[in-house]
Amino acid sequence: MLYALQTIPGLGQLAWREVETSISGDSERPGPRLLGLKAVPGRDDIVLIDHKGGPRPLLKLRTSEDVFAIAARGFKIAYDDRGLRQIHAAVRGSEMVQDALNAWRKATNSHKQNGTFRVIARTVGTHRFMRRDVGRAVADAVRDGWPGRWLPVEDDSDIEIWATLVESELICAVRLSDASMRQREKIKHLPASLRPALAAAMVQLTYPSAGDVFLDPMAGAGTLLLERAAAGPFAEIHGGDINGEALSAMQTNLRGARGEISLSRWDARKLPLDDGEVDKVAVNLPFGKQIADESLIPGLYREVLAEIARVMRPGGRLVVLAGKTGVLESARYGAARVLRPLDRHRVIVLGQAATIHEYVRESGPVRRYAAPQPARPQDDDDDDFPA
Ligand SMILES: C[S@@+](CC[C@H](N)C(=O)[O-])C[C@H]1O[C@@H](n2cnc3c(N)ncnc32)[C@H](O)[C@@H]1O
């Protein structure tokens, strides 16, 4: 059975990594297999997998925002009007439709054999036809050829069928997830809050383990803390923010989480934590329009990184999301060189490019860094510091 996982642009590989580590095979059934990664630029990454089991474990994944059962695929679709006829034929005659509808019934506990549907069409490439023509070709094929009686409607359909044409390849899939997979248990959202799937990917990069003392020093509404709490056992979670409104949102959002969780109003430049007390840190530093005076960012980054390095034990892992790699690396180089850079992952956050940076804390002392006042603005050259 073929499935598609949809996630934030740039997270496709990390979404697959979560599948590999969380869903295993056994002697009777092999584990999931990666078939490919597709990008709808600026919108989504799509991970195509072959998974012999039902959809339930896929719906529990945290780095994906939606799960689909693939109902039809088309290859070598022409860029001119012949393409629309090829799409119609591929969707109408596909042998995968019955399995996809069964997966939908399982995922939604439905017994419906007939009902309503709507098509969400997306195209990437210079086709001579429009996106809505693709939608119409798919809708005609579903109505004419799928088992049961399915009627197209504009809204509130029983089934959503997503038709994605990436250049000459068509993926037509039935949506198995609903909005709750994307939004999850978070109740309060602040303007700078992370999407949960991105927070989950960052937490995954800390390699969660049961003994973790985990910290988010600039936690906002607490999305990273929530994801860490959901990622498995931990020893302690510490989160805080300088802003009172953020602290109250964080407290509300973490009300249901169990374990040793302490939330505080603090300044991340002077954390009330001992040297080497923390194993894992994930943080989404303020960037872009999130901070009133951008010229303060370089100084803030230096002070916060030095403080993070101070409270981390050697060997601990840090994962940072930041907008400007040059500014972040300059701050690390100036104030916290014991944080050794590892991999980077480019993502799109609220339409803006950003990068997830992984670091490991090497041994050596770190002193608190006091930024000179006022800090000078830095340029935003992405690659002016060595990794
Ligand atoms: C990008 S937001 C974090 C969003 C958070 N990851 C979420 O999903 O809600 C950055 C946060 O840093 C906080 N902040 C800024 N300066 C701070 C400081 N010196 N100490 C602690 N928090 C600070 C802001 O109040 C803001 O909530």
Image (cartoon, grey):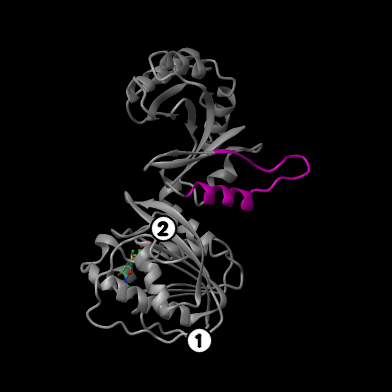
Ligand 1 closer than 8 Å to label 1 CB: no
Outermost right residue: 27
Range shown magenta: 11-36
Residue 71 lies in magenta, yes or no?
no
Q: Are marks 2 and 1 in contact (CB under 8 Å)?
A: no
Q: Tell me which corner region of the image, top left, top right, bottom left or bottom right, holds residue 306.
A: bottom left
Residue 22 lies in magenta, yes or no?
yes
* 81 up-or-down from 55: above or below: above
- Give the quadrant of ligand 1: bottom left
Label 2 sits on a secondary structure element that is strand
The amino acid pointed to by label 1 is: Pro
Residue 365: give its label.
1
Determine the residue positioned at 51% across, 64% down. Answer: 229
Q: Tell me which corner region of the image, top left, top right, bottom left or bottom right, holds residue 335.
A: bottom left
Q: Name the residue carrying label 2.
A: 355
- Residue sitting nearer the eye, 172 or 243: 172
Determine the residue positioned at 36% across, 79% down. Answer: 303
The crowding category of the residue bearing disc 1, from other C-alpha atoms within 10 Å (few below 14, some 14 to 19, many at least 20), is few
Q: Tell me which corner region of the image, top left, top right, bottom left or bottom right, holds residue 250.
A: bottom left
Residue 362 as seen in the image, left or right of residue 135 = right
- Residue sitting nearer the eye, 180 or 243: 243
* 363 up-or-down from 168: above or below: below
- The spot of residue 35 in percent (x, y) is 59, 37
The crowding category of the residue bearing disc 2, from other C-alpha atoms within 10 Å (few below 14, some 14 to 19, many at least 20), is some
- The spot of residue 2 in percent (x, y) is 59, 33
Residue 334: give its label.
none
Determine the residue positioned at 57% across, 52% down. Answer: 18
Residue 264 seen: no
- The spot of residue 10 in percent (x, y) is 45, 49
Tell me how far mark 2 sits from mark 1, CA to CA. Answer: 27 Å
- Residue sitting nearer the eye, 194 or 123: 123
Label 1 sits on a secondary structure element that is loop
